[in-house]
Amino acid sequence: METTEETASLKRVFGLTTLVIYGVGDILGAGIYAVVGKIAGLSGGLVWASFMVAMSVAALTALSYAELGSRFPVSGGVASFVHRAFRTDWLSVIVGWLMFCTCIVSMATLSKAFAGYLITFAPIFPAWLVVLALFCGLALINFRGMEESSSLNIFCTTLEVSGLLVVIFASAFFISGGAASNAAATAPVVSGQTIGWIAIFQGAALAFYAFIGFEDIVNVAEEVNNPERNVPRAVLLSLGIAGVVYILVSWLATQVLSPAELSASGAPLLDVVRRAQPNFPGVVFTFIALFAVLNTALLNFITASRLLFGMSRDGLLPAWFSKLHATRATPYRTIIVILPIAIFLSLSGTLQFLAGTTATLILAMFCLVNLSLLIIKRREGNAEGFQVPSFIPVLAFVSNLVLIAFASKESHLLAAAFTGLGFLLVLVRKAFMKQDAT
């Protein structure tokens, strides 16, 4: 039999257990290590309530994703769902573009965080070299395939979960000894103002960033065994596990440190461990945080490459992106394209303004996902597999809009800028299509 240049399908290497680990690792990731302090600056001692609100909003959309992933177990995720519902190429291109932007910006941001952690232990290495080495290593793992990527993901997920367990047990021993922060025992205030629902929802709009990742599970559906059954279960189990951990960690953190101390900290969970258990080696916890960042960056890289692959195969991007490697069966061309873009963004020094925008963009795309499910259910009726009642995507749509409204104005402006760039890409694509037609 003659060997062809590319294979036609992705390898199915995920079972339910490994898929849940993939999802938990993607959700937990670096989010909780970074944003809990900033949320405390908004919602004070009720930071746990902000995480609970964010989890509730995420759970509604996760139910919609669970049905869509069961109905259409293909790569492409949100772009494929929107295209199937609205049957409009330009909208699917914009949605795919915005999702791609969030992945790439997240990768670049995490690479800078990774460099910052590493340089504290090895200051002889320049930041640009660390970033370059990190992305080249991640690209190699991604190219070799999901089996290698999944193995590293399991290792990194184990480390990052162990770090959160350290926070939980260290804080629990601290509290059981009667040393809980006096500030946590009083009414939750920030800057002298009592915290109310507005502050809790503002915190939830930021906390939603920490829940990003459950939607990535559907992007690897073609690499899952029995996806109609395993994808919905993995989406809900991953989000539930991560949500419980988040709420517990955030509540304990405010019992050890005051909201003001958490807000001012650049490494809030590390400071929690240092206060709760001064004898615990900070190097160990920092090492754990380093791999948590690495794991999230890897999963973002995988998602971005599969997203381009799925959009290309659906005809939304040039067919060149949909070619798979002959032996590894991975979308190697998308990996090659992503690598220099991510490196450029990481070294550009402008990514500090984009953290809040990521959550805003994701929430906006989730609105489209929920609308897509409503349209598909009305047009195609019920299907075999996981099903949710129609009021679930309606509630999810409304709750997403509520959190968007509580996001910062800067996030709204940056999200609008990315959207505008997406419309520009649509116009360019149409121009090329007309030129090819003539």
Image: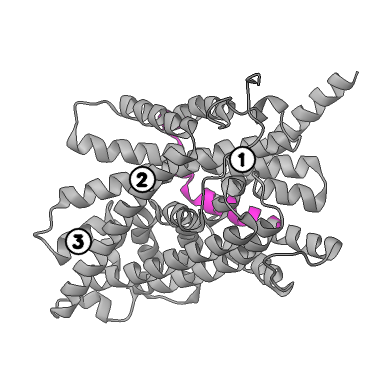
Disc 3 on helix, strand or loop?
helix
Q: Does 66 sit above or below residue 92?
A: below
Disc 2 is placed on an element classified as helix
Quadrant where the C terminus is found in the figure = top right
Residue picked out by circle 1: 307
Residue at 61% from the left image edge and 55% from the top image edge: 226
* Residue located 16% across and 47% down the image: 283
Q: Quadrant of residue 93?
A: top right
Disc 2 designates what residue?
293
Q: Nearer the viewer, residue 362 or 309?
A: 309
Image: magenta residue range: 345-368
Kindly check if marks 1 and 3 are in contact, taking CB atoms under 8 A apart as contact. no
Callout 2 crowding tier (Cα within 10 Å): few <14, some 14–19, many ≥20: many
Identify whether 259 is placed above or below 137: below
- Which label's residue is closer to the chain start, 2 or 1? 2
Q: CA distance from mark 2 to mark 1?
A: 21 Å
The answer to whether residue 261 of the structure is visible from this angle is: yes
